[in-house]
Amino acid sequence: MSGPAGGLLLIGGSGRLGGELRRLLPGAVAPPRSELDLTRPESVRAALDRYLPELVVHAAAFTDVSRAETERRACWRVNVEGTRHLAAALAAGGPGLVFISTDYVFDGRRGMYREDDPVGPPANYYGLSKLVAEELVRLVPRHLVIRTSFRGRDWPHPVAYTDLFTSQDYLDVIAPELALAIARWREIPWDTLHVATERKSAYELARRRRPGVRAGSKREAGVPLPDDVSLDTSRWQTLKALLGRCAGRAG
Ligand SMILES: NC(=O)c1ccc[n+]([C@@H]2O[C@H](COP(=O)([O-])OP(=O)(O)OC[C@H]3O[C@@H](n4cnc5c(N)ncnc54)[C@H](OP(=O)(O)O)[C@@H]3O)[C@@H](O)[C@H]2O)c1
């Protein structure tokens, strides 16, 4: 893959997405949380001083949507306050910032959201925390908010919901797309980008990797879930074709 690689500081490199990004962007530096803890602003500043990155990729979060309902303080501390510490350290300029955000920032009533559609009110607390974090990221002069949605490589549950629509896909499908967007971040002319695949029900997605999965309803979930958080990805599809053509010319 072409791109910056060197000069890239990845926060959240031990996570599911972070692990894939490390593999796809081998030049990235990914300090563990013991070194860079978003809730400790001095550790954020120290890492920025130590690595002098050209680009910071913020892929760290409190990601458990169910626990975020009951552990709101912990979720807010990482997703909002942690992002605030990072944004404050980058607000004066310097490195660019790519923030990995979520389809859950939308209300999830109608689906096929475009990048410039109004956000919120989110259906759950995790979505609210990521929405607020997005706005903090926008204080950084050179920023890109990427909204996405992914699963691991398999469908881990025996049940999948037929009444929840999404543009989500499996990590092995989504991570290479995100890595491409990160590698080519300088050529992206927008400050918000949706990177996902086509609209489908969660059940449809589940059947691709777990054919015997049971069809269920999101009423079983025990956490408020939206009806349809699918994303319009036409910006990314157009850009990707263009980036491919540019890479072809360069090569
Ligand atoms: N999963 C999805 O469906 C989905 C959808 C849309 C967007 N996203 C976003 O994509 C990103 C990655 O998600 P994921 O599912 O790969 O996450 P994950 O597997 O839950 O990993 C979370 C990462 O955040 C790190 N982290 C947590 N608290 C931190 C702190 N205080 N300081 C520094 N690092 C901290 C964790 O480090 P430790 O290993 O030390 O805990 C870990 O590396 C997140 O921003 C998430 O909001 C996820």
Image (cartoon, rainbow, N blue to C red):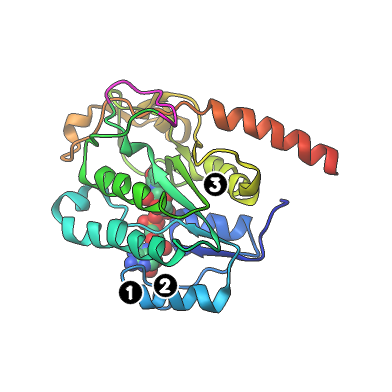
Which range of residues does the magenta coloring cover? 109-116
x, y percent for residue 234: 54, 25
Q: Can you identify the residue that label 2 sits on? A: 44
Specify whether 162 is left or right of 99: left
Residue at the spot 41% in from the left edge and 53% down from the top edge: 139
Give the amino acid type for the residue marked by disc 3 in the picture: Ala
Q: Where is residue 101 drawn, in percent x and y?
A: 40, 46
Amino acid on which the number 1 mark rests in the picture: Arg
Counting from the top left corner in percent of width and height, residue 216 is at 25, 27
The amino acid type of the residue labelled 2 equals: Val
Rendering quarter of residue 33? bottom left
Horizontal side, residue 3 vs residue 152: left or right = right
Q: Are marks 2 and 1 in contact (CB under 8 Å)?
A: yes
Measure the C-alpha gap from mark 3 to mark 1: 28 Å
Nearer to me, 40 or 177: 40
Q: Which residue is mark 1?
A: 40
Observer-side mark, 3 or 1, equals 1
